[in-house]
Amino acid sequence: MLKKVDMQIRKTNVIALDTVEMVLKSTYISQTAVPGQFLHVNVPGHTLRRPISIADVNRETETITILFKTIGSGTKKLASYLPGMKVNALGPCGKGFPIDNEVPSNVLLIGGGIGVPPLYYLGKTLAKKNINMISVLGFQTAINVFYENAFSQFSDTHIVTNDGTYGEAGFVTAVLDKIGDYDRYYACGPLPMLQAITKELDHKSGYISLEERMGCGVGACFACVIPTDDHGGYKKICRDGPVFKAQEVCL
Amino acid sequence: MMDLTAQLPGLNLKNPIMPASGCFGFGREYSEFYDLSKLGAIMMKAATGEERLGNKTPRVAETPSGMLNAIGLQNPGVDKIIETEVPFLANYDISLIANIAGSTIKEYEKVASAFNETDKVHALELNISCPNVKKGGIQFGTDPSMAAEVTKVVKKASNLPVYVKLSPNVSDIIAMAKAVEEAGADGLSMINTLTGMQIHLPSKKPIIANKTGGLSGAAIKPVAIRMIYEVKQHVNIPIIGMGGINTADDVLEFLLAGASAVAIGTANFRNPFICTEIIEALPEVLSKYGFQSVQDAVGKGHDIE
């Protein structure tokens, strides 16, 4: 169930260009959040909350890790907050990745940019189920790269940069035919990336996590809808998603 | 004990606070946060004759002290709303206001008469001011004679009190208010959003897919207060005030300007509990400024002649 919670900042860290990792303490969120869900974060002085995906959860220390890019005034303000200060969030929001017993034993994680974080919590969770994982993580350029070592702990990890300054050159799709076999993929990243992946891997079972500008974040305002077919079907990204079956939505 | 009640045509409100249309869906999501019976009323999301799918995304963008939206009246159509949403809201001890919209006068008529089929709805809010749909909506809301015509048709079609929701995107708000009052409106609700645009620098294009959107939030409160204040001096029907309310102090400001009740919209997005928090804070604010009741404060911002 969604709750409005105050979370104390434990740590903040700039881990790549304009990319902040923030560790927050919340008993409720840490006990309830599943991979793929997000927090709708309040930034005082701003009209709308910021949807930020959950990158990791530690149930023992009751902490949640989020990563965000400092693009606009809201995320810049959030980045300026110091440990000890409180952040208000609605959460855990939305529906996450299905991690039931039907997960095949070989899976592929594909992340692009700030779409990488939710796959980390997913990968850590799947690792506990002894799932074999391959990760393909795409970034614009070398100074944007983060979490390579973290993903390497549980997966065969490939880094791709658009300009080739680190790892393979090009888009994540450039390496998809060079990696090992897998039976399902999980992807999160910018829309063009998801469009390319769902097209190229249309013969595979897959789940994708979408982002969109959001209003309420709880399903009431109809700001973040996505069509599911050509005749009027739709889903709300904030409530029915952000994770969908690859064939469930029209990108 | 502060008297928070408000009596308006068709609406016997235990308090003057209601979520504004389009910002609260049909209440289901917010019912998970609190008991909706705490509210005075709910203004439902707009109903049209048939299902509408709305605009392309992005549909929202934050602005300084506000936001733009261009949802495009997405809704399942009036029949489905009466069948599935109204019965859900009827479980709560609140007044229900159905917001009705259309592209043609015929569609408004159809939607208005459809609500005669249920006894769970207490009033209609006639949406002649949605800035985000290609046809209808705002044309009816910017021309006094067209506004009067659609009001007359809806009044004739419906057996419920009709509150006409006025657009601020006009040069003479008083003429609009007087036209719909003469056409038989039982009340006014004001204001809807102000048309605006925001351009995204990286793409050099408007952020909102619809290009323009309706500006709401704290930024528009002074516009709402000014328009309600002006209209109050020229009409004898009650006003439900809205536009950027975030606090109980804001509510009092609307009452002083001349609103008899108020709706809270955009503020629900940042704080799902905003309506209940304002209801709890209102008695102290009224009492601090020397009022014994909500009714006592209505219109007290005007000079007594």
Image (tube, helix red, strand yellow):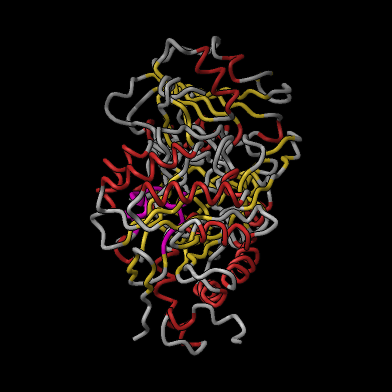
Give the vertical position of B305 relative to B225 (above or below): below
State the residue in front, A184 or B19: B19
Which residue reaches farthest bottom?
Answer: B290
The spot of residue B186 in percent (x, y) is: 43, 62
Q: Residue at x 45, y 69 (%)?
A: B261
State the residue in front, B165 or A3: B165
State the residue in front, A77 or A80: A77
Residue A31 appears in the rendering: no
Give the vertical position of A184 relative to A71 (above or below): above
Give the total number of marks visible in the rendering.
0
Residue B31 within the segment the image draws in magenta: yes
Give the vertical position of A185 relative to A24 (above or below): above
Q: Which residues are magenta?
A: B18-33
Residue A155 within the segment the image draws in magenta: no
Residue B70, picture quadrant: top right
The spot of residue A76 in percent (x, y) is: 67, 53
- Which SS does the magenta portion mostly show? loop
Q: Residue at x 60, y 57 (%)?
A: B176
The spot of residue A221 in percent (x, y) is: 47, 46
Q: Residue at x 62, y 48 (%)?
A: B143
Q: Please indicate whether residue B79 sits to the left or right of residue B219 in the image.
A: left
Give the vertical position of B51 relative to A57 (above or below): above
Residue A96, picture quadrant: top left
Q: Residue at x 49, y 90 (%)?
A: B290
Residue B147 appears in the rendering: yes
